[in-house]
Amino acid sequence: MNQPVVPPAPVRTFRSDGDRADHYKKHRAEFNPPLADAEDYGRKADTFLSGPRGQYTLEHTRQDGAVLRYNPLTDEFGIIGPDGHIRTYFRPTRGLRPAESAQYFQKKCAEGGP
């Protein structure tokens, strides 16, 4: 019997290398263990946002078409814009205040834009 072919998840990227580098500089201190560089940050963002949704990862698609993901166990949060590019990826409270991070996710879900 043939197994159905499952296409790989699309690779998501930031709009530009500069955009990815800017986000890396802004958010690199939030990750432990530290991320090696902007490319490592981009790969981690892509895996979180484009890969299969983990058991504890919450996902919401807003009216504007943006897809938001949040994992309360790892405190990872990210947004893919309607254009398919990664808008952001970070840890809202570095895992220190999970209730605040969950509220942040819910607030961003209710918004219609970035």
Image (cartoon, helix red, strand yellow):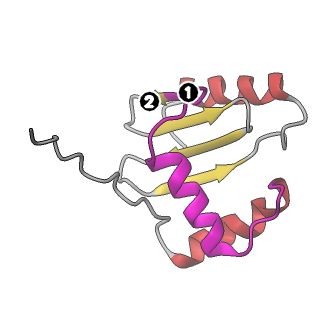
Q: Is 45 one of the magenta-colored residues?
A: yes
Q: Amino acid at mark 1?
A: Gln
| Quarter of the image where one finds residue 95 | top right
Q: Position of residue 35 (x, y in %)?
A: 75, 66
Residue closest to the eye, 50 or 62 = 50
Instruction: Tell me the quadrant of the picture where the C terminus can be found.
Output: top right
Does the image show residue 88? yes
Q: Which residue is mark 2?
A: 62
| Residue drawn at the location 58% of the way across and 65% of the way down | 42
Residue closest to the eye, 8 or 69 = 8
Cβ–Cβ below 8 Å for labels 1 and 2? no
Relative to residue 54, is residue 81 drawn left or right?
left
Residue closest to the eye, 29 or 35 = 35
Q: Is 27 one of the magenta-colored residues?
A: no
Q: In terms of secondary structure, where does tag 2 sit?
A: loop
Q: Position of residue 84 (x, y in %)?
A: 37, 53
Q: In terms of secondary structure, where does tag 1 sit?
A: loop
| Looking at the image, residue 59 lies above or below residue 28 | above
Relative to residue 28, is residue 80 drawn left or right?
left
Does the image show residue 80? no
Q: Which mark is residue 55?
A: 1
Q: Which residues are magenta?
A: 31-59
- Say which label, 1 or 2, has the lower sequence index: 1
Relative to residue 77, is residue 63 drawn left or right?
left
Q: Position of residue 3 (x, y in %)?
A: 16, 41
